[in-house]
Image: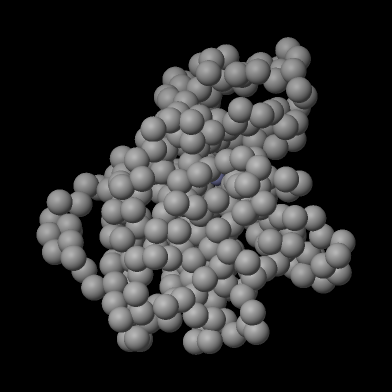
């Protein structure tokens, strides 16, 4: 049974598309979220499956299931007005002080979601990439984070270097959970236009729930078979200065650029890799002043 009555986050009524399942046993408060970007369809399917499958009798602690941006999802759009996954930095505190009637769709949703993220011991936010990619985990590089990131058995775990904290890398849902004492993870399940395998995402989500102590383990030998991913640290980024910016090739996630290789051009300005690097999160839509891609090393 899904209920609001026992929710650790006590609200008279839950906002739409958010469910709390209170376990019969003590355990962590875990948030699983999907469709923070409305065009990333898989996360919502995972969240909805958990709604039907997770029973209070089998659950330790509390599970909060959130469909991030249902309005954008209904319209097959990444977002309607603002990128919801860029509102959880300094901006959230400003939004909290504003009248709700003045907020746009994503700003309102950020205010609705924030209390759950503040209470979460663990967050798994399921996304898909704009460009072709193998699945990977994005999180901080602490021992505690890496322990749970390894559960996903991806080829890569990506994290930002401490000197590389521009607002785009400090305003996502996982950042917000980390700031409030929890452990935040973003799982990039693959390319949103490619063949993303639902069953694989479900299996990994269940493994995560078992690893954090929400469910009893059914993967007894998973530790032995665990593959250690390459740890890729984001050390740099490429910021377009105009809409004339263009990449030298159609980069996919984890494409490698050599030292000195031209990455992009913008009105005569040439962007070169200063060392051999992975291209991370290459964007389709260029927005001057915001990163067109990041560069990572391991
Ligand atoms: Zn996304």
Whether residue 81 sits left or right of residue 19 in the image: it is: right
User: How many numbered tags mark residues here?
Assistant: 0
Along the viewing direction, whichever of 19 and 183 lies nearer the viewer: 19
As displayed, is residue 72 above or below residue 190? below
Residue closest to the eye, 87 or 197: 197
Asked which quadrant contains residue 188, the reply is top left
Residue at x 64% of width, y 79% of height? 13
Q: Quadrant of the C terminus?
A: top left
Between residue 35 and residue 293, name the one nearer to us.
35
Q: Position of residue 36 (x, y in %)?
A: 58, 52
Q: Residue at x 87, y 61 (%)?
A: 102
Asked whether, in this view, residue 49 is left or right of residue 269, the answer is: left
Residue 60 drawn above or below residue 147: below
Q: Residue at x 53, y 43 (%)?
A: 40
**Colour pattern of the rendering:** one colour
Image quadrant for the N terminus?
bottom left
Q: Is residue 46 above or below residue 256?
A: below
Q: Position of residue 90 (x, y in %)?
A: 72, 61
Residue in view at x 29 percent, y 54 percent:
203
Q: Residue 291: name its quadrant.
A: top right
Which quarter holds ligand 1? Answer: top right
Does any portion of residue 192 appear in the rendered image? yes
Q: Position of residue 15 (x, y in %)?
A: 64, 70
* Residue 157 appears anywhere in the view: no
Position of residue 265 measured from the top left corner of the image (x, y, whole percent): 66, 16
Answer left or right for 198 relative to 17: left
Q: Specify the quadrant of the image occupied by residue 135.
A: top left
């Amino acid at each position: 049974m899904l209920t609001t009555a026992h929710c650790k986050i006590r609200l008279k009524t839950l906002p739409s598309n958010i469910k709390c399942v209170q376990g019969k046993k003590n355990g962590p408060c875990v948030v699983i979220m999907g469709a923070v970007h409305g065009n990333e369809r898989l996360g919502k399917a995972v969240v909805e499956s958990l709604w039907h499958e997770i029973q209070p009798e089998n659950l330790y602690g509390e599970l909060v299931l959130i469909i991030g941006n249902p309005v954008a999802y209904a319209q097959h759009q990444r977002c309607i007005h603002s990128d919801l996954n860029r509102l959880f930095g300094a901006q959230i505190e400003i939004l909290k002080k504003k009248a709700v009637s003045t907020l746009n769709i994503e700003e309102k949703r950020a205010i609705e979601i924030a209390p759950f993220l503040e209470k979460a011991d663990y967050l798994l936010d399921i996304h898909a990439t704009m460009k072709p990619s193998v699945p990977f985990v994005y999180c901080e590089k602490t021992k505690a984070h890496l322990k749970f990131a390894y559960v996903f058995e991806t080829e890569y775990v990506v994290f930002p270097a401490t000197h590389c904290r521009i607002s785009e890398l400090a305003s996502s849902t996982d950042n917000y959970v980390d700031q409030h004492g929890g452990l935040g993870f973003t799982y990039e399940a693959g390319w949103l236009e490619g063949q993303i395998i639902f069953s694989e995402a479900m299996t990994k989500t269940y493994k995560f729930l078992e690893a954090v102590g929400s469910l009893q383990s059914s993967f007894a030998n998973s530790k032995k078979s665990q593959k250690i991913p390459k740890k890729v640290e984001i050390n740099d980024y490429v910021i377009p200065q105009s809409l004339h910016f263009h990449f030298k090739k159609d980069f996919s996630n984890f494409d490698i650029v050599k030292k000195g290789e031209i990455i992009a051009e913008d009105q005569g300005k040439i962007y070169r890799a200063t060392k051999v690097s992975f291209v991370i999160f290459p964007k389709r839509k260029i927005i001057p002043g915001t990163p067109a891609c990041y560069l990572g090393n391991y």
